[in-house]
Amino acid sequence: MKHTLLAILFTLTACASAEDPQPLSGSLTYGGKVVHSPYRPGTVVKNTFLGQFGYRVFETYVVQPDGTLKLTSQSTGPDFLWQ
């Protein structure tokens, strides 16, 4: 029974993290901003900024066919790793 509960917990955690990342304060598309890119559709655009508690936030966007940016991945790490 204990193993079943752990398996369900891990499954729910994996499902919760499978959603699209949400823009944070400092993101290019935060607050519903529509940013148009001069790059071709499919181009990957990277953004980094200092987030909450001094952590560096790394974001990856993909240019959509209409020229807008779609946030595809987001991760954080200590700021001292950023050179």
Image (tube, grey):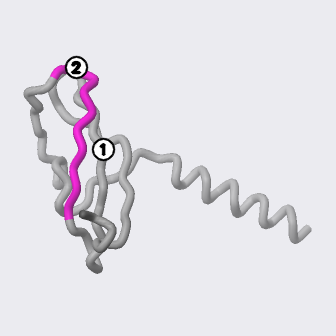
Q: Residue at x 27, y 64 (%)?
A: 82
> For the residue carrying disc 2, how many other residues have a C-alpha within 10 Å: few (<14), some (14-19), or many (20+)?
few
Nearest-to-viewer mark from 2 and 1: 1
Of 30 and 49, the residue lying toward us: 49
Q: Is residue 45 above or below residue 15?
A: above
Q: Earlier in the sequence, mark 2 or mark 1?
A: 1
Quarter of the C terminus within the rendering: bottom left
The residue carrying mark 2 is 65
Of 49 and 81, the residue lying toward us: 81
Q: Is residue 20 above or below residue 57?
A: above
Instruction: Please state which amino acid type lies under the numbered disc 1.
Output: Thr
Image coordinates for residue 23, horizontal then vertical, percent: 27, 54
Q: Residue at x 64, y 56 (%)?
A: 12
Image coordinates for residue 33, horizontal then vertical, percent: 12, 46
The residue carrying mark 1 is 60
Magenta-tinted stretch: 40-49
Give the SS element for disc 1. strand
Image coordinates for residue 31, horizontal then vertical, percent: 16, 54
Instruction: Please state which amino acid type lies under the numbered disc 2.
Output: Pro
Q: Residue at x 59, y 50 (%)?
A: 15
Q: Residue at x 22, y 19 (%)?
A: 65
Residue 48 magenta-drawn?
Answer: yes
